[in-house]
Image (cartoon, rainbow, N blue to C red):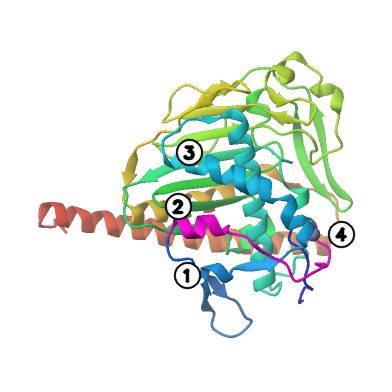
């Protein structure tokens, strides 16, 4: 059950005592005292009550080889400058957004491995990949929202649940009133952005199978068939360097794919952006854009909404993406029981937070009108 230590970047035993901040130090400092104690999910155990997990934020570090750590410092500093530009309402380029999406891949997979280590593998899942193998691999979506500014804060959403443990594809991070929900999954936006896509994906004993077909060479609206928040900026990017299925590279040798890519050689699709329900825009490689959206809710409500959205996204991906094919009955049972648990916990989290939102809204109404009709 207990996993041995591994470098969160390459998965090998770490060669030295070097450690990596999964939530980077610059972000911790930007949002308050770096030594502050924060709650990071629950300490899990069989047959005993779970307790809240507390951390001094600057101690939330995990093993990493020094060489790996150094390799990623350039990505970290680029992501930092793009995030700071967004917070300052300055324009950011298409390439900067693409790099920022790499950084979200890093943080998402890093958090997944961090909770795996902290939970001592209670869910019985051995990681088959580490940060190195997940950066820039699969299609991505980033939803950006704002809340009414209050104190400085940093919050992580959706990472301490069975759903995220089984498939670390969607999570949220909130920074001083800016809220980012990040999703990455193979072919998440490919079909509706006109790229080659699989007809269906079937998970079998010897791996995942799918038949990749030609793209439709046009964009379909909405890009994802999932209801996005009312006021938000949504960013989509198809990625095709590798896929879940054996690659049919000739399908990507089309004018459409070339025109809609940032780096065709590397399989990096163009960045598409939609601001507050406006027209979907494809950004040219050197084009810049200012990320701008209004605050609709206070922090409390926004954070509760993030939990609802993240859990629903995780459920949606589970619904849409996998069909179980031929495999031994015990494997099928194992996967089904995991999915069932993931869904149950997410549904409880969704209804609990929807209740919190309702209660909060009625309290706000009482505050505004000084009376209640209940
Ligand atoms: Zn390493």
Could you tell me which quadrant the N terminus lies in?
Answer: bottom right
Residue to which mark 1 is pinned:
38
Determine contact: label 2, label 3, CB under 8 Å: no
Counting from the top left corner in percent of width and height, residue 100 is at: 60, 41
Return the disc, 3 or 4, that comes first in the chain's sequence.
Answer: 3
- How far is the residue under mark 4 from the one under mark 1? 43 Å
What span is in magenta? 10-31
Upstream in the sequence, badge 2 or badge 1? 1
Q: How many marks?
A: 4
Left or right? Give the position of 206 relative to 1: right
Q: Using the numbered discs, state the Cα–Cα distance from disc 2 to disc 3 in whole angstroms.
A: 13 Å
Of badges 4 and 2, the one in the foreground is 2
Label disc, if present, on residue 328 of the rendered structure: 4
Residue found at x 57% / y 27% = 272
Q: Which residue is mark 2?
A: 175
Q: Is residue 90 above or below residue 217?
A: below
**Local crowd size for mark 3, using a 10 Å CA cut-off: few (<14), some (14–19), many (≥20):** some
The residue lying at 34 percent from left, 37 percent from top is 294
Marks 4 and 2, the one that precedes in the sequence: 2
Secondary structure beneath dot 4 equals loop
- Which residue is the site of mark 3? 85
Is label 3's Cβ within 8 Å of ligand 1?
Answer: no
Label 2: few (<14), some (14–19) or many (≥20) C-alpha neighbours in 10 Å: some
Q: Secondary structure at mark 1?
A: strand
Q: Secondary structure at mark 3?
A: helix
**Is 95 situated left or right of 226 in this image?**
right
């Amino acid at each position: 059950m207990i996993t041995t230590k591994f470098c969160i970047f390459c998965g090998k035993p770490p060669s030295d005592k070097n450690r990596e901040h999964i939530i980077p130090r610059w972000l911790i400092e930007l949002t308050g005292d770096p030594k502050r104690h924060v709650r990071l999910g629950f300490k899990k155990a069989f047959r005993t009550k779970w307790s809240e997990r507390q951390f001094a934020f600057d101690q939330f570090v995990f093993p990493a080889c020094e060489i790996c750590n150094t390799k990623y410092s350039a990505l970290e500093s680029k992501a930092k400058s793009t995030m700071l530009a967004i917070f300052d309402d300055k324009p950011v380029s298409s390439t900067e957004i693409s790099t920022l999406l790499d950084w979200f891949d890093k943080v998402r997979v890093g958090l997944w491995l961090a909770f795996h280590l902290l939970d001592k593998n209670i869910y019985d899942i051995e990681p088959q990949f580490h940060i190195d193998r997940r950066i820039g691999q699969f299609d991505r979506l980033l939803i950006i929202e704002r809340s009414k500014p209050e104190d400085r804060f940093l919050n992580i959403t959706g990472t301490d649940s069975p759903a995220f443990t089984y498939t670390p594809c969607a999570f949220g991070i909130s920074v001083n009133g800016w809220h980012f929900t990040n999703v990455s999954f193979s072919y998440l936006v490919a079909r509706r952005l006109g790229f080659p896509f699989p007809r269906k994906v079937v998970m079998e004993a010897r791996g995942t199978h799918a038949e990749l077909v030609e793209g439709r060479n046009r964009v379909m609206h909405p890009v994802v068939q999932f209801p996005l928040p009312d006021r938000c900026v949504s960013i989509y990017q198809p990625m095709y360097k590798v896929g879940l299925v054996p690659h049919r590279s000739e399908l990507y040798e089309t004018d459409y794919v070339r025109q809609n890519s940032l780096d065709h050689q590397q399989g990096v699709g163009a960045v598409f952006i939609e601001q507050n329900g406006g027209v979907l825009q494809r950004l040219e490689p050197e084009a810049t854009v200012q990320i701008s959206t209004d605050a609709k809710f206070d922090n409390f409500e926004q954070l509760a909404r993030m939990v609802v959205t993240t859990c629903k996204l995780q459920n949606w991906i589970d619904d849409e993406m996998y069909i179980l094919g031929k495999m031994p009955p015990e494997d099928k049972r194992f996967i089904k029981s995991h999915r069932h648990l993931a869904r149950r916990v997410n549904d409880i989290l969704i209804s609990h937070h929807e209740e919190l939102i309702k209660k909060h809204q009625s309290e706000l109404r009482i505050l505004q009108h000084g009376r209640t009709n209940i």
